[in-house]
Image: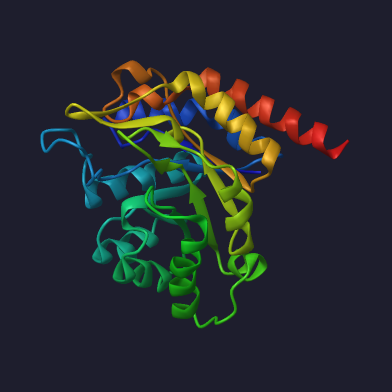
Amino acid sequence: MIILTGPCVLEDRDTVMQIAEKLKPLSEDKRVEFYFKASFDKANRTSISSYRGPGLDEGLKIFEEIKKQFGYKLITDIHESYQAKPAAEVIDILQIPAFLCRQTDLLVAAAKTNAKINIKKGQFLAADSMKHPVQKVLQTRGVEELNYQVSKDNGVWLCERGNTFGYGALVVDMRNLILMREYAPVIFDATHSVQIPSTGGTTGGNSDFVPYMAKAAAAVGVDGFFFETHINPSIAKSDGPNMLQVDKLYKTVEEIFAIKEALKN
């Protein structure tokens, strides 16, 4: 199973390295295809005064240190087309943020690298609409056919995190997990699915629901999971309310595997 996990944003070096160290047993789990996740720049923060991260150059230095020390494969977001090429020299998966999943130049720039691409479904889109971002990547890579196996072979994934209804709470339609798998492997973003966007100057959420959402997705069937985690979510510089504390992450992962085993029987 694919698991993408780590802090929302690269904080100070010591905190990031502590989180990376805590995730080492998960990276060594033979059942898991592990990727360490963090962002060098959170360009879509609600408030202009919110912490965004160390930026591209400094962020890539931290990622290089993580890769050298732990041997982790890495995933990070890009928000601008020019970031794709330098990021892909260090990063294994370039992630396209949900709000930017229709941005052709960003998708094309990512597709021109050798990195895998994880495209997050926009909170404003139906599952069927996500075939178009996948097509943009595949056609840039010289592939015209569109189906699950073609996308998998060409390193293109789709990531579900819910849709926005009413006053901003995200609601996950589990049918999307089935429908999007027609086009590409599907990752379920369990922590962002419990976000409550724009509660004042920051984004809120309730991490208590994360294990339930993850278990529901496991029962439906997905290719992997995205979890943001921290040694102490209460002091995290971004997305703390919907993050899992590292020990709870391990418990949730075991529950997911128990569901998968039950389904085999």
Q: Position of residue 6 (x, y in %)?
A: 44, 35
244, 162: nearer the viewer: 162
Residue ID at (30%, 37%): 10
41 lies above or below 179: above
Question: In which quadrant of the rendered image does the C terminus lie?
Answer: top right
Residue most extreme to the left: 49
Q: Position of residue 140 (x, y in %)?
A: 44, 79
The number of discs equals: 0
Q: Quadrant of residue 46?
A: top left
Instruction: Determine whether, in the image, residue 32 is placed left or right of residue 3.
Output: right
Q: Quadrant of residue 180?
A: bottom right
Q: How is the image coloured?
A: rainbow
256, 15: nearer the viewer: 256
217 lies above or below 141: above
Residue most extreme to the front: 166
97, 61: nearer the viewer: 97
Residue ID at (60%, 47%): 175
Q: Position of residue 209 (x, y in %)?
A: 50, 23
Q: Position of residue 231 (x, y in %)?
A: 41, 20
Instruction: Determine whether, in the image, residue 251 is placed left or right of residue 203.
Output: right
